[in-house]
Amino acid sequence: MGNTDVLISGGGIAGPVLAYWLRAAGFAVTIVERAPAPRPGGQTVDLRGAGRTVVDRMGLLDRARAVTVHERGMAMVDRAGRFKARLPADSFGGEGIVSEIEILRGDLARIFYEASLPDAEYLFDDTVTGLDQDDDGVSVAFEKSAPRRFGLVVGADGLHSAVRALAFGPESDLVRPLGLYTTWFTVMEDMDLGGWAQMYNAPGGLVALARPGRLPGEVKAGLSFRSGPIAYDRRDIAAQKDIVARRFAGAGWEVPRLVRAMADASDFFFEPVGQVRLDHWSRGRVVLLGDAGYCPTPLTGLGTSLALVGAYVLAGELATCGDHRAALRNYDRLMRPYVSEAQTLPPGGVGGFAPSSALAIRMRAASMRAMTRWPVRNMLAAQFAKAGNIALPDYDLPALR
């Protein structure tokens, strides 16, 4: 590339993993992150298939296993909390809805952040505000830091990517909404989950989810609902909590308790569910990675895998190609089939996840019960394994310790 200084916008999962592999190949890496420090907590994500292979090649799989959240599987419950269907974690060889390795997003991000040190430079509490590229590099303006010049800029800054907006266009043109809003937050409640991730559906497209946290008494909660576009201020957390509370008024199960606890949750996160589908992930010396370029939505369970595999492939191509343009073309070519597979929604799509009627909810429970029976179980096991896997190139990059 000539100039081997790389700027990565986003310090979550994809950004630090890319930094790890790039610095192994001799690149100078800077990461700019809007948050004032690595984000703690968060919800449970999974390591499966090729994503788990990337972590293993980094030499970090044992560290990830050490902070695993142990879940027995996924269970559907009714208004009274009775189990209507359940999928044990081992139903599909550890590659199903609940995978063998479930880990809190903040714990996983911390592992990757520490692995990227000490050589990666971090600019916390800042963001990219301007990009001006030419044949030799990209001049970058920041909200707080002084302008700097880089050979390549990577947008790994999520669904609402600032880099994508600057280089590719407005979010409204590039993110495909699915008519679903979701929120995640942590509560400390005495809920007897029995080690199961418990999901409750209510008519009107309401979904409540409670999963065991890693600490005693910790519950990771999620409240999702189907809706057309909602106008709201992304900075007004209190107003967002009010939207969710009004939507779930009168819902059964543990929802009233979760809504009350939501009021005091410090890690509350609310956003529309959408997919990012682009014909190309690079424009000149700017390239997108992870959710910024190809968000599959949480419904597929493959967002983390895409971030990990994408970071590994992008770093490998940049390290082994003599020309960044060829590297970015190869990155697109290798990732495109995997991304297309990962973005395929489960049967029923949003309607299958958040049924509108009581009848549809009963049918969903019956469908989940059928998943554990032969031959459906074998067919689904093959589908889960296929969706999470890709033949990873061997770039012979050293695993740093």
Image (cartoon, rainbow, N blue to C red):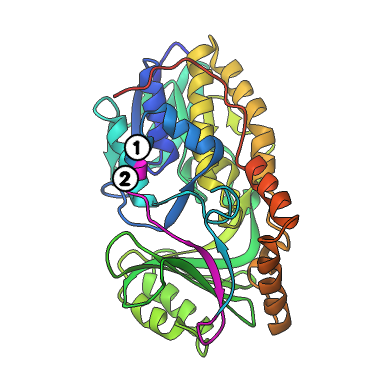
Magenta span of residues: 64-82
Task: Identify the residue at image location x=65%, y=43%.
Answer: 387
Asked if disc 1 and disc 2 are in contact, CB closer than 8 Å, the reply is yes
**Relative to residue 237, is residue 76 drawn left or right?**
right
* Foreground pick, 270 / 349: 349
Q: Position of residue 274 (x, y in %)?
A: 60, 56
**Residue at label 2?**
66
Q: Position of residue 322 (x, y in %)?
A: 53, 9
Q: Position of residue 87 (x, y in %)?
A: 58, 63
Q: Position of residue 173 (x, y in %)?
A: 65, 50
| Element marked by disc 2 | helix
> Which quadrant, please, contains the C terminus?
top left
Q: CA distance from mark 1 to mark 2?
A: 6 Å
How many numbered tags mark residues here? Answer: 2
**Relative to residue 310, is residue 107 drawn left or right?**
left
* Foreground pick, 125 / 184: 184
Q: Amino acid at mark 2?
A: Ala
Q: Does residue 118 show up magenta in the picture? A: no
The residue sitting at the front extreme is 374
* Foreground pick, 100 / 265: 100
- In the rendered image, which quarter is residue 226 located in? bottom right
| Placement of 377 over or under 313, stated as above or below | below
| Placement of 285 over or under 158, stated as above or below | above
Q: Does residue 67 show up magenta in the picture? A: yes
**Residue at label 1?**
62
- In the rendered image, which quarter is residue 33 located in? top left
Other-residue count near label 2 (Cα within 10 Å), few / some / many at <14 / 14–19 / ≥20: few
| Element marked by disc 1 | helix
